[in-house]
Amino acid sequence: MTGSTGSVSFVGSSRALRSMRALQAMRAIRAGRSRARSAAPWLAAAMLVASCLAAAATGARANAGGAASPAIGAASPAAGAASRFAPVPGPFAVEAMNLDWFDQDRKRQVPARVYFPRHEPGPFPVVVFSAGLGAGRNTLEFLGRHLASHGYVSVHVQHLGGDDQLAKGGGNARQAMREAARDPQAGLTRLLDLVFALDQVGALAASSPVLRGRIDLGAVAVGGNNLGAWTALAAAGLAMVGKDGEESSLPDPRVKAALLLFPPPAAAQGGRMRFEHVKVPCLHVVGAPAGGQQGEPQAAARRVAFDRIAGADQVLVRVIAAAGASVPGRDPAMQDHLKAISTAFLDAWLRHDAAAKSWLAGGGLAAYLGNGFQVETRSK
């Protein structure tokens, strides 16, 4: 791995390749799959995630196909959409639980926190979030609770080694995060954590005492904040072209949509990214450059995924107010915006709700956000 603080590259070792081939073979045998995937797609996707690690480390302290699920909300799409997507709790009481999963293949703990409706039978759509660099499983709790109150299961994954323990360890926390970003296994590990969590969601639906039969495995989304947004997009199919010109990707067929919240700019690696394999709708919420200067070179890098994904419907929300407004952990107003935007987006593409799609693309979202934001949508 080489590079300065602003540029990180990933170099896969032969040992990593061997371990990944063994891991994939074991999982294929255990799941009874007809074919085993090679390690190359995992490593290429990890290269993508690692390319954004240093940018995430710089800002991490500020950011402390199946049947549709039944739609929930007003019966009149035209009259009720605006009130449905107000940032107020939904009709369901919310319960939360911490889970300490253990991936036997990698001998690795994967902590998670799950928010879900307390009593209702479901089944409910599910979204699995990847935490940003320097964050833990309690990150985005405001969003997890809100989504659960509206009839979703929200799973928040913590990535040990790049989590909130870096900031709690004392000393120079930012330097510790930069060192974690330079770990050549970091991008690969994050991606495997997320896919492992998707596996565990299936296990919860099959055998959990509190969630058995209550999760709609045909309505699964991934999401992430900060670096977690790139991890989520890698699971949705984002590819990387290696130095030898070979392109690899691993779109997970379980993923039906992606929420990408404030991803770090990816200018340094933008030319090596390939978005053709991303075939699911994505919500992109991107922050303003420092000082709010939209002509600043990183402005285009912040929206590169929206501009280059052509295989599915896309929604872009750009923060054009002060950059500090894009810190969801510190700004109650931004938290409310994310509640409304995320609920409408998930209703649109996990519940196939026509009113939600119309609100997002037909001016309702832009009117709700008002000054300080710009909304763009693109249909396939």
Image (spheres, helix red, strand yellow):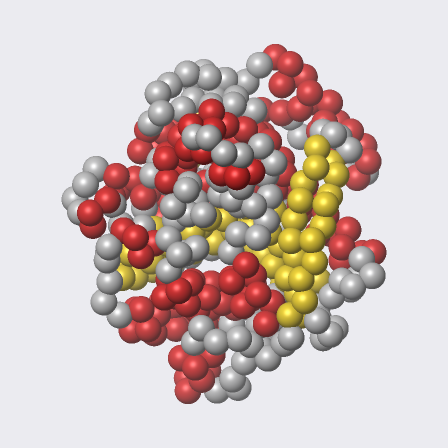
Rendered view: 285 above or below 162? below
Can residue 148 be seen at all in this image of the molecule?
yes
Q: Position of residue 333 (x, y in %)?
A: 36, 66
Q: Position of residue 364 (x, y in %)?
A: 34, 74
Q: Position of residue 225 (x, y in %)?
A: 46, 48
- Tell me if 119 is positioned left or right of 38 in this view: right
In this orientation, which residue lies closer to the viewer: 273 or 48?
48
In this orientation, which residue lies closer to the viewer: 200 or 89?
89
Q: Position of residue 149 (x, y in %)?
A: 59, 72
Q: Residue at x 64, y 62 (%)?
A: 115
Numbered circles on residues, count: 0
Q: Residue at x 41, y 87 (%)?
A: 79
Can residue 218 be seen at all in this image of the molecule?
no
Q: Residue at x 53, y 75 (%)?
A: 89
Residue sitting farthest toward the front: 171
Rendered view: 226 above or below 220? above
In this orientation, which residue lies closer to the viewer: 369 or 250?
369
- Tell me if 116 is positioned left or right of 11 in this view: right
Rendered view: 199 above or below 268? below
Residue 244 picture quarter: top left
Residue sitting farthest toward the top: 14
Rendered view: 95 above or below 201? below
Q: Quadrant of the C terminus?
A: bottom left
Q: Residue at x 52, y 23 (%)?
A: 183
- Tell me if 74 is positioned left or right of 366 in this view: right
